[in-house]
Image: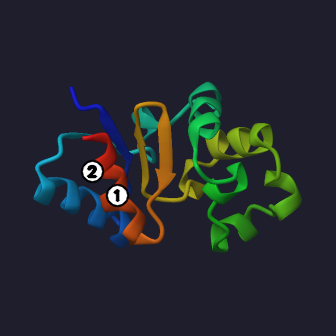
Amino acid sequence: MADITIFHNPNCSSSRAATELADELGVDVDIRRYQLKAERPTVEELRALLAVLEDEPTALVRRDATFAKLGLADADVQSAEQVAAVLAAHPELIQRPVLVADGAAVIGRPKDRIAPFLAAHS
């Protein structure tokens, strides 16, 4: 089993770049397709992820058309607890890719954050 997990959306070029780079580097990763019903993270899993995320919790939330369509505002995703609740209910709003390993996590945006994380944790 891999020690690195990538929260992956195959429709996202940044997410694909992360998995391709892991392959190129020969790094074994677990792919978590978080938008699939069977792989959606729970509130508890999201809390744990946010606790080790190098970025502010609110950075994990995509602010795109779906965010607006759901009627969400920045005030709805300011605290880690709010972020965990919103993302558990709407995993499509999870920023991607997210790389997790050894009690650390990073959002792979910009893409130049991916290689150093993989190198540090493989």
Circle 2 — which element? helix
Q: In the image, what residue occupies the spot 63% across and 39% down?
A: 50
**Which quarter of the figure is the N terminus placed in?**
top left
What is the three-letter code of the residue carrying label 1?
Pro
The picture places residue 111, in percent across and down from the top left corner, at 39, 70
Q: Residues within 10 Å of mark 1 (few under 14, many from 20)?
A: few
Circle 1 — which element? helix
The picture places residue 56, in percent across and down from the top left corner, at 69, 53
The picture places residue 53, in percent across and down from the top left corner, at 58, 44
The residue labelled by disc 1 is: 116
Q: In the image, what residue occupies the spot 35% across and 39% down?
A: 5
The residue labelled by disc 2 is: 119
Give the CA distance from mark 2 to mark 1: 5 Å
Observer able to see residue 12: no
Quarter where residue 31 is shown = top left
Q: Is residue 5 above or below residue 70?
A: above
